[in-house]
Amino acid sequence: MLTKTVSALAASFLTTLAAAAPEGGHGGIEKAGVVPTVQQGIVPMLVGIAVFLVVLAVLSLKVWPTILKGLKDREDKIRTEIESAEFARQQAKDALEQYNKSLAEARAEAQKMLDQTRAQQVALAAELKAKADAELTTLREKAMKDIAAAKQAAVSEIYAEAANLASTVAGKILRREINAADQRRLVEESLTQLQSVRN
């Protein structure tokens, strides 16, 4: 609507100018050296103002809104990209924090498992050592009992053999009279028999 108004004003202004133009054969051209009249100076000025207003109206109504719209669209696009980049940065920061938290939790869990495993190993080693010590003590006691029993059996056997030997020697002594040579010979026989029994 404003465009139609401006066009109508321009048309009426041009009509006024055409009516006010001088009617000479000069076609509105001034001669050199002649001072223009007020009427001749106002017409070009009014034409210039009218053209300026028409150009200003066209620029204001057609070109300027297009430029403003382009600038606004660019501003909105840049703002959207900045907001998107800020959102992506915040998401990356949150993801990094979550990753670091998960990593710390995993490290703590691994350390806890390692500590538990070490404690179990120490307990198992102590248990195995206690069992080995108990078995060793049992074996030692059994060996000592076996040694004592074998010693007792050997001593009993030696006593029995000594008693036999003493009986034999006594029998031989009672059957005959012993001189020094016989006594030496009997002692040597007894020692020989005793040594053979020990082996």
Image: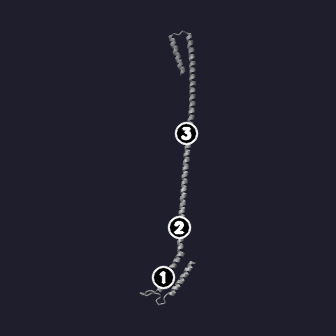
Q: Position of residue 198 (x, y in %)?
A: 54, 21
From the image, tell me which residue sits under label 1. Answer: 45
The colour scheme used here is one colour
* 3 or 2: tag closer to the N-terminus: 2
Q: Residue at x 52, y 15 (%)?
A: 187
Q: Residue at x 52, y 12 (%)?
A: 183
Question: How far apart are the alpha carbons under marks 1 and 3?
Answer: 109 Å
Image quadrant holding the N terminus, namely: bottom right
Q: Nearer the viewer, mark 3 or mark 2?
A: 2
Question: How far apart are the alpha carbons under marks 3 and 2?
Answer: 70 Å
From the image, tell me which residue sits under label 3. Answer: 122
SS class, disc 3: helix
Q: Are marks 1 and 3 in contact (CB under 8 Å)?
A: no
Q: Are marks 1 and 2 in contact (CB under 8 Å)?
A: no
Q: In the shown orientation, is residue 26 left or right of residue 84?
A: left
Label 2, residues with CA under 10 Å away: few <14, some 14-19, many ≥20: few
Query: Label 1 sits on what residue type?
Result: Met
From the image, tell me which residue sits under label 2. Answer: 75
Name which quarter of the figure residue 116 lies in.
top right
The relative height of residue 142 versus residue 72 in the rendered view (above or below) is above
Q: Nearer the viewer, mark 1 or mark 2?
A: 1
Q: Which mark is residue 101?
A: none
Q: Residue furthest top?
A: 177
Task: Please name whichever residue, 66 or 43, is drawn nearer the observer in this view of the structure.
Answer: 43
* 1 or 3: tag closer to the N-terminus: 1
Q: Position of residue 153 (x, y in %)?
A: 58, 22
Q: Residue at x 56, y 21 (%)?
A: 155
Q: Nearer the viewer, mark 1 or mark 3?
A: 1
SS class, disc 2: helix
Q: Residue at x 53, y 56 (%)?
A: 93
Question: How far apart are the alpha carbons under marks 1 and 2?
Answer: 41 Å
Name which quarter of the figure residue 145 lies in.
top right
